[in-house]
Amino acid sequence: MDRSTAVDGPTGHVRGGAVRLSPLGRVGAAVLANRKAAAGALLLALFTAVALLAPLIAPYDPEASDFLPTAPPSAAHWLGTTSLGQDVLSQVIWGARPSLVIGLIAGIVATVISILVGVTAAYRGGLPDLLLSLATDVFLVLPALPLMIVIAAYLKGSGTWVLIAVIVVTGWAFGARQLRAQALSLRGREFLEAARVRGERGSYVIVCEMLPTMTSLIAANVLGAALYAVLAAAGLQFLGLGDINAISWGSMLYWAQNNEALQTGAPLWAIVPGLCIALLGAALALLNYAFDELSNPALRAARRARGRRAP
Amino acid sequence: MAVIARRLVFFVITLWAALTINFFLPRLMPGGPVLAMMSRFRGHVTPQAMRSLELAFGVDIHENLLAQYIQYLGDIAQGRFGLSVSFFPVPVAQILMQALPWTLGLIGVTTIISFALGTLIGMVAAWRRGGLADSVLPPVLVVVSAFPYFWFGLICIYLFSAGLGWFPSGFAYDLGSPVALSWSFAGQVLRHAALPAFTITITSIGGWLLTMRNNMIATLSEDYVRMARAKGLSPLRIMVLYAGRNAVLPNITGFALSLGFVLSGALLTEIVFTYPGLGYLLYQAVVGEDYPLMQAIFLLITVAVLAAVLLADVANVLLDPRTRGHQYR
């Protein structure tokens, strides 16, 4: 290992300047190179495919209660039926949609707010930084779940969009703090000074100069926020907040728990939706973990240190 | 100390933010839920209680908002949270005091256990880079930490309570048994706490482990660690006293930051296990549409988190001399 490999792109396999990838391309290549990230990406792709193809692959109408209630798994109903006689497998398949939609939208919206607050704070400095950081810290410390529960309880029976809004309001602060720290480390660098000397506007400097250097951290943030959103939505739906009549993994758990599915011979009704939430969460967490390695130079440097220490 | 004083100011601001959210939430909401609650209780409760509800939620009041707000802050400062509507006519404060010890016990103990275990394993994992603890545990725990706490709790009930019958599936002690300071009662409490504690510990340990491992990796490449190696100090001493001691500092800061997340999961766990702490109480309040109780629980949890964060801050100042400097940060 010579010195030049160490300073080349974060993936470690874009070497010698022969291949120059865009920041997004670099991220993609890194995901494939990392086993954990590849497993996460595969799972996520699987769930996305299930969600998109739900009308084609679901064996029955998920709402139709035409079957024998709480039937055990059989050839006709792989995961059995609910206490209302609905097909569990069809519900699981359709339930992928709300979870993915909430994760995707809440993840992106929360990250956009994190960027707006965190990067602006770092760029402006002074009083704006003080105030924005204070707001971030306050939202970080306010316990999110009780706050979400209280808000959602006031907006009883509200749908997906309210759920997303509640999650975003309580979930943007963590990312804002991380992005601010990263943006602070960029302050005073020559390419930013150059842009300022050219007379570029603040918004241009932030969007076109600063953000591209933070791609992997931003991607990690979207994943982290999406993970938070998926789990938070599942928790709220499980408590019966949100629309319990819409089919989602969380509301399936709500009905399964209220009908004592685990005790009355339909355990799969409670186990499978939870497992899906867990697997979707795991997919996002694995990808996030990989991005963390990607955006944190210390972890990469230390990986090479293993070789250094051996002799 | 200046750092602590600055943090205290921050806490006052956070508390004020929580109070303000609490005050404005029912007033901003589209009329429905509060009015519905009021009409449900009209006739069932005394006119004075009705009036106190109206005051608390700003319904049918012609005073201006500012006067209401000041009145509200004054009430809270004196510990008057109003009356619970689902446990009428018990004051909210009294209900909170019954639930608080269970939550403090369960979540306090499990958080300390998982912090200690996670930090220890993370330290060893980073020390033996590529060893079993390093290559297997982190990814496994990352996956586990993405599990919904409440679902993991359900599975634990299914396997260990309904299935094997090892542990009771809910509540904090055997129903009907008198609360007493005896060994048998203590045994009951432990048996009932075992499954929820296991659930919280397993699902929260991953976060501490990963932070510690990552800090430790950074610390291990420091010159003073290399120097210690060169001096031929024992590996255990280098691991714990040289690298570990320094790597744990950011973890204590992280402790303060992620406590809110852990707490949220733990509250859901309480609900699954019908453990009579604040989480389960919050659930009962939601089911009973008991808004005064709900808001008081939110406030109390906020205060608890702030207290824990303040403790972590004090610990950080005591452990890390750098934080005592004035130009720190």
Image (spheres, rainbow, N blue to C red):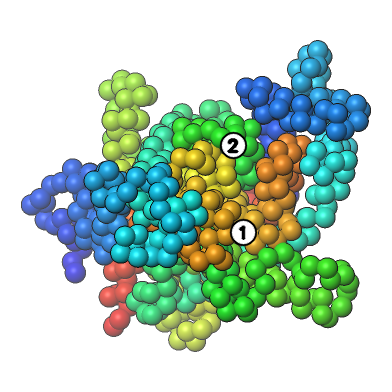
Q: Please tell me how crowded label 1 is: few (under 14), some (14-19), or many (20+) other residues with Cα within 10 Å.
A: many
Say which chain tag 2 marks: A
Image quarter for residue B111?
Answer: bottom right
Q: Please tell me how crowded label 2 is: few (under 14), some (14-19), or many (20+) other residues with Cα within 10 Å.
A: many
Residue assigned mark 1: B272
Q: Quadrant of the C terminus of chain A?
A: bottom left
Are the residues under badges 2 and 1 in a single subunit?
Answer: no
Under mark 2, the amino acid is Ala
Q: Which mark is residue A152?
A: 2
**At 53% across and 39% down in the image, what residue appears?**
A242
Disc 1 on helix, strand or loop? helix
**At 70% across and 71% down in the image, what residue appears?**
B192
**At 84% across and 36% down in the image, what residue appears?**
B82
A281 left or right of B41 in image: left
Q: Position of residue A252 (x, y in %)?
A: 48, 51
User: Is residue B136 something that shows in the picture?
Assistant: yes
Identity of the residue furthest to the left in this view: A18
